Image (cartoon, coloured by chain):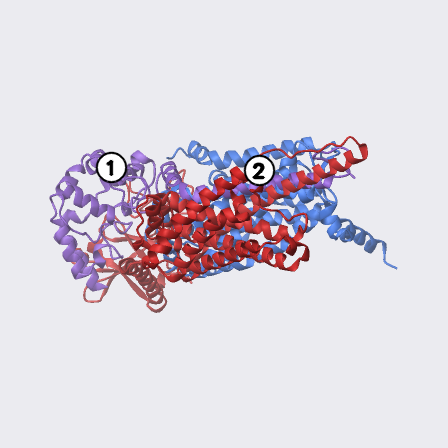
Chain colours: A blue, B red, C purple
Amino acid sequence: MPTARTQDLMRFLAERFPLEKFSFRSLVQKKEVPLHKMAWAYYLGGLALFCFFIQLSTGLLLLFYYEPTVSDAHASVEFITHNVSGGALIRNLHTWSSSAMILFVLAHLVTTFAMKAFEKPREMTWISGVVLLLLTFAFGFTGYLLPWHQIAVNATKVGLQSIEEAGRYLPGELGKLPGQIKELIQGEQSVGQATLSRFYALHVVILPFTLCALLGFHLLSVQLHGMSQGVDKATNKTEAFFPFFLLKDFSLWGIGFLVMFVLALCLPFESFFSFPLFQPFDPLGSTPEGIKPEWYFFFVYYPLELLPFWFIMLASTVALGGLFMTPWLFRPANRRTLAFLACAAALYLIVMTVFGQNIYALFKGSQ
Amino acid sequence: MFDVFFFVGLPYIAVFTMVAGTIYRFRKDRLGVSSLSSQFLESKALLWGSVPWHIGIAVVFLGHLIPLLAPGVWQALVARRAFLITIETLGSCAASLCLVGLVILAIRRFASSKLQTVTTAMDLVVVNLLIAQVVLGLGVATAHRWGAVWSTGTTTPYLWSLLRFNPDVSYVAELPALVRVHLVGAFVVFLLVPFSRLVHMFSLPLEYLFRPPQKVVWANPRRLLHAHAAVAAMESRRLFLKASFGLAGAGALLSVGVFDKFLGFFRGPRMTPDEEAKLLKTRLDRLQLTVEERELELERIRSEQIFVAKVGELSPKDGKYFIDYKMRPALAFRDEQGLPRLISAKCTHLGCTVASSVDSTNRLLCPCHMSYFDVKSGAPLEGSPAKAPLPLLGWILVDPNGKTVASQGPDGKLEGKPDPATLDVCSVYIAKQYEEA
Amino acid sequence: MALRVAILFGVAALAGRGAHAYPEFQRYSQQVSGRFVNCAMCHVHPDGPIGLKPGQIGKLTPAELGQLNSARGAFLPGQDVMNPILNEFGNALLKKLGKKRILELRLQPDQLADAYGYESDIDGDGVPDAHEFLQGTDPVDPQNGAPWALFTHNLRRYAFPHLFLLVTATALGLFGMNNLLKWFHQTMDKGSPEPGATGTKH
């Protein structure tokens, strides 16, 4: 006879993973998508998934020519861009689509929050989503180093250095720990071949496999539970997931691909930056001006530049903890409150990303 | 003589017969201008035979007609590899479709006893002739590749010479036998048009493509329901066909594009020797840099002291970069007493390399986040993101005879006093003894 | 290493101030464009001509040193010289203007673009070299240029067949998808009393 506690656990699991619904009929044929004024947000996750598919295919192609050594990485990337036919296109597609992926993942997060899609029994879906977000950022961070140009290596150095900074706020011997963690990540005293090798392994093997596994879990639980109702007053208007929602999803992917392809073909991502940033990294020369992380890290980078480090540490720990605990923290909240919070978060992200440079200049008075 | 008969006489006779015979049939026996449909007798095989054949031949026909009508435009188009491959692939697929359809139609004629009663000898001649003609066309496409290109210089001018009534057989005289037979076959098909069911090609019911579906309404309510169902089925079939057309078109275009890009990508670049040499040179230079860096690393593990520069080479304003024991960049200046001043160039904020020259107020700048450091003490200036000073490095001064004349630890404690006269030729070294364990 | 240092200082002493890059142009480009620019706009090495790295004077072979010296003598425009420490743009400047005029222009860097003219486009990215100088972008890298200019140029360049085919494919696909949706609606609503896009929640 199972104890009461085991029974509770069993009930918890059974509610979160209603595997009796694991049938073609209930996953595909019976699934309905609600129609209301926020219904557009149901497509954002699909778009992020589509970007991931593009990343996977273009990334595999880049693997054919890329060489992960400090002496050859930059040369091989240049070779892809300037010599291989279609290489510039594929590389640009990879870059543009990585940005688009992060954009859609963030938009997906904000809208699902506003729509209270983390409500019971979808807590695990939400948490896997948060981990997927972190994995996406990890993809961005590791991939940024691989071309081994000035901005790549220096921005990576800056990013890793901020781990070590944390040591200043820890007492005694514990203060050395962050520095050791940093060296563990970069594999040697400074960013070098060891760092490149392990970032490469992370970017092309470990992260993709982890992401695929977690994505499978995420998508399965989305299908098991169906779409959340999304608005406070449930509408009784719905459309069938298959084929209507899915076909609209695919149409959107088609348009997305068109836009991304035109951008990749006609507008090299690197043209937005000063050209010295893309010269091969020179460990003994000077660092060119304008070293910055990718735009999707601005929301933490500019505050890091402006505010005391301990504050950022505290704020990001709270934010991250909050993200993981959202299903329980915001259980009583109604969707009006959540939408307000989501708008505030979106506003912060947009302002910091678009105007971060201006805000920085305003406070620092430089440039 | 042979050429003149087949390539001048035959075409004119064929076209004249076709035009005159068709006009005659239209005037004499208008209702006889038909395909002599046998759909009432057998419809299933007809669908699978007739539809592929007609779709295929429409594409193939356009592929023959467009180069003839607009040879200049065509030539410009086929000069692009992607277009050429696409058009040849499309043509071959369409021809295969024709062949499949024709074979089904031919088998249908033989297999059904009902049909045999209405089949004339001419029907059999036509279907076999068409099969032969399609096989020949496919043969030309495979045996003598890129017909879309070479036809612009051979068959196109030949056919134009016929149209201008100034026949010139020299264009086709040297062509391979397969091509010549294909041409003759085409003329024979033209010739047979007025005598066979082929004449229906001139009574294309084109308006069917554009008119809305017609609804036959019966007065009887039971029949009405049937009519509705029939209309719905028709509408549904139309939608499905449109959908398949759109998706198949998009799929075909995308696969051509993807195929073209991927093929080029995997084939890799085809470089001129100059380009290849340039590329190789760049890669060798980069390798060399790596080698030099590794040598520095080895030197730092092995030697107790490492040469930085002669004192005379150093200046108070422009620092000289060198690499310290931990493989980090550092700068060598000369201070007011004329002695070396070695300072780490790795910014204590986030690890960028500090710029090598000092500005007018003796400040060093880290360009990453605009940290300023005082060159004398290494201390960061007010308002810099960096909070810790750039560490000063210890040095040893060795005169040309190899004798250590002075040294300074990282703490700034000077030992010994160098002779100002020979100071410029003394060498500056960094020493392992000054590194913390 | 010691040999190379010796060569370096020998050459530097020989050349005097001629061995320095002309930072006036760099500063001007940076000032009018707002972009960071370094020596690699005209030189082979981003840190300029002096040093021991590839593309710098200290690394030149004797043959290249010969080329360097004859390039230094190219005071008048139109001379067929190849300076091994300059990139294609640097050499094009030297050939078009001659060293004498370049030295004069150091005092009026704003006139360099007009003097050089707006016809030449070495990297073929649709932005003339002189504009790239004024916009602070790399004149020898087709992937680098003012974004809008690059975008419009490439749009025209790839309009046919790339973009045309892609737009056709997308339009066909959307057309097909749309009809497929309608088809599904029709076949699935068969039997239900009122046709429409929506079902009711179960």
* Residue C159, picture quadrant: top left
* Residue B224, picture quadrant: top right
Q: Is residue A224 left or right of residue B209?
A: right
- Label 1 belongs to which residue? C118
Q: CA distance from mark 2 to mark 1?
A: 55 Å
Query: Can you give x and y, in whole percent of width and height, for residue B333 in the image?
Result: 26, 51
- Residue found at the far front of this picture: B28
Disc 2 residue type? Leu
Disc 1 residue type? Tyr
The answer to whether C111 is drawn above or below residue B285 in the figure is above
Q: Chain of mark 1?
A: C
Q: Is residue A83 left or right of residue A111?
A: left
* Residue B66, picture quadrant: top left
Query: Can you give x and y, in whole percent of width and height, for residue B252 in the image?
Result: 52, 49
Q: Is residue A352 left or right of residue B320?
A: right
Pick the residue in front: B218 or A66: B218
Can the viewer see residue B273 in this picture? yes
Count of numbered badges drawn on the protein: 2
Can the viewer see residue A267 in this picture? no
- Report the residue at 23% width, 39% height from top: C24
Query: Can you give x and y, in whole percent of width and height, for residue A222 in the image?
Result: 69, 47
Residue B209 — which label? 2
Quarter of the image with the C terminus of chain C is top right
Q: Secondary structure at mark 2?
A: helix
Q: Secondary structure at mark 1?
A: loop
Q: Chain of mark 2?
A: B
Pick the residue in front: B378 or C61: C61
Q: Give neighbour class at mark 2: few <14, some 14-19, many 20+ (Cα, 10 Å).
A: few
Mark 2 or 1: the one toward you: 2
